[in-house]
Structures are given as structure tokens and as C-alpha cells.
Image (spheres, helix red, strand yellow):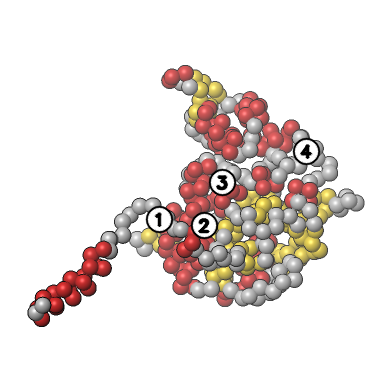
Amino acid sequence: MNYHATLMQGIVAAAEPMRKLEPLRDGVVIVSGSELTPEPVRWLWPNWLALGKLHLLAGAPGQGKTTIAINFAATVTSGGRWADGSRCAPGNVLIWSGEDDPGDTLLPRLLAAGADASRVFFVTGSRVNGEVLSFDPSREMLALQEHVARIGNVRLIIVDPIVAAVAGDSHKNTETRRSLQPLVDLADSSEAALLGITHFSKGGQGGDPSQRVVGSIAFTAVARVVMVAAKVKGDEGEDRRILARAKSNIGPDNGGFEYHLEQSEPLPGILASSVAWGPPVEGAARELLSDPNESDDEPSSALDGATDFLKQVLGGDVVPVKSIEVEAKDAGISWRTARRAADKLGVKKKRGEGGKWYWTMPK
């Protein structure tokens, strides 16, 4: 074989592996279990706040939910101790609040809790064509991820209220899941614990606290840990505030801590509330947060919850009854209770094309 033939064989042999490579195509990505390495859950606060995961903090108005979240933020920024005494490695915190002003409410609370203000960052809006508008998570989440990366070492992200991240109807399971996915991705990409704050519905006292979260059951389904804050009566009739775990897919789902709210003056003329932790408590959230003076099957509570549900689902629209049934089931509301709530509200019921029934709120 002459020199040129040998050279050509070498070139062809070298090119053969390249010939076998195919360009990556769009489509389903599948990974074999043998290619994965088992990893433990990484905790910001062991068994309470996990890095890279979405959490919920729920409760009735006036229970200090935002103040509790601010306490978490202060613990992270100062490298302080959690309620159980464990130490937290210092890190940065990002807060997006649609309810409280950073200057006159959030910062004073942070200072009262002992936070390092230089480690706290607030989302105050987004600039579009030179104009500052309200932050829109459906449009600005990628930009927010880039900001988090630039800040660096962000270990806690607080979204208050988390329902503000839902672009559509927060009672609809599919729309809620779709809207929460960017938050799940943000927590994962930034390796931060993301804490969303939400409210309880009026109904359901005595039941599973995680099922009392306002809106679709997707909120509690997507969250890996659900914490609840509530005021209950003690054995001697005294008021007790308790933070408890109502659900956890990645750790213990019971136990909690007593807490109470204090007023202080972190700066002259600046008053703010803060959390003082009490002893740990044992038991399931349903047991810890039950009021002995309330009946588990108190009809008025369930009816109040169903009434709130219908007000939000119907709004000013004409809604198919079949759609309402599905949403009621997702929200954990029996159809019998939903119909009683409709009667209480004076909901108008009429038959439309094809014999389908529709409900609408009275004007």
C-alpha cells in the first residue's frame, strides 16, 4: 500500500467516530437511574427549610406570618441560631413582598430581629422601556434568576404573598401549578430555600391545617414543606402561638415551637414587631392547632370557607357548574357545602346551550 492510500485510511478511520455522532434533538429527556448519584437533602434549617425547595408558611391574619419569615431572614443574614438552637451559616436573603413596604415595615422588623441589612435585597419592581412597573414573575423570572446569581450566596427567598405569583385563577389546579413552576425552578437554580406566605380559609377548623390553605390544593402539593402558624387556647385558657409543620415530603411532618410577638424600637422613633421563640412542642399540627372550644364538624366553618371559595371562583363571570365542581373538589370542599354556600350568596343558576348549567354572582 502506497503512502497516499495509508494516509487516506488514517483520515477515514479518524472521521468514523465523528460520523456516528448525531445532533441533539428537541424532545423528551430520559436519564437512567444508573447515571444518577443518590444525594441527601441539604438543609438551611434541619427538617424545616431545605435548600433548593419550595416551602409554604400559612395561617390566619394576625398570626405574625411575615414577622416569622423576617425572623428566618435575620437568622440567615446574621448567622444566628434557629428556634431549636442550631446554628445557621450566614448568607444573603431576597424578599419580594406585594403587601408590605420595605422602608417603613420590613426593614424595621429586620433590624428588630437582629438582621444584617447589607445582606437583604428587596424586589421593588421591574423597568420596562425606562418605566418602573410592578414585578411580573411570568415575564421577569429569568431576569430575577440572573440577579440572584449576581448577588451570590442567596440562601433564602421570601415571596409574600405567594398567590401573587399566580397569573390566572389561584383556585384552579392547572393554572396554579403552571405559575408556581418558575418559583420551583428559581429555588432549584439558586440553591436557596424559597418560602411562600399565604392565608388560611375561614372553614375547616379541626381538620388538616395544610388543607386550609387558600386557593388550589396545588399550593400544598407543590410545596415540599408546609408550616402553619396559629393562636390556640392552652390547658388553662391562656393564648398560645404555635408554629408547626403540617406537611413534609422530605422530613418529619410533626412538632413545632411556641412563639410570641414582641414590640421594640430598633431605632429612635421606629417601632417594629419581632418573634421570640418558646419551647418546642410535640404532636401533629392538627392536634397542636385545634381549639378545644371548636367542633371538628362545625358546619358554619365549612360553610364560610365554601362561601369565600365561590366568591373567588365566580367573581364577575358566568362559570359552568362542571368547572366549579372540579375546583371545589380540588379545594377540598364538598359539593353539598358548595351548593349551600351558593344559596347563602344568592348565586344565580341558569341553563345554557346544550342543557349545561351555569352559576353567576348576583349583581
Residue drawn 74% across the image and 51% down it: 285
Name the secondary structure under disc 2: helix
Q: Which residue is mark 2?
A: 184
Marks 3 and 4 sit apart, C-alpha to C-alpha, by 24 Å
Marks 3 and 1 sit apart, C-alpha to C-alpha, by 25 Å
N-terminal of the pair, mark 3 or mark 1, is 1
Callout in the foreground (3, 1): 1
Q: What is the three-letter code of the residue carrying label 4? A: Asp
N-terminal of the pair, mark 4 or mark 1, is 1
Give coordinates of residue 191: x percent, y percent: 53, 67
Q: Is residue 310 above or below residue 107?
A: above
Marks 2 and 4 sit apart, C-alpha to C-alpha, by 34 Å
N-terminal of the pair, mark 3 or mark 2, is 2
Q: Quadrant of the C terminus?
A: top right
Q: What is the three-letter code of the residue carrying label 3? A: Ala
N-terminal of the pair, mark 3 or mark 4, is 3
Query: In the current view of this chain or complex, which residue is farthest to the bottom?
Result: 3
- Is residue 264 shown left or right of residue 66? right
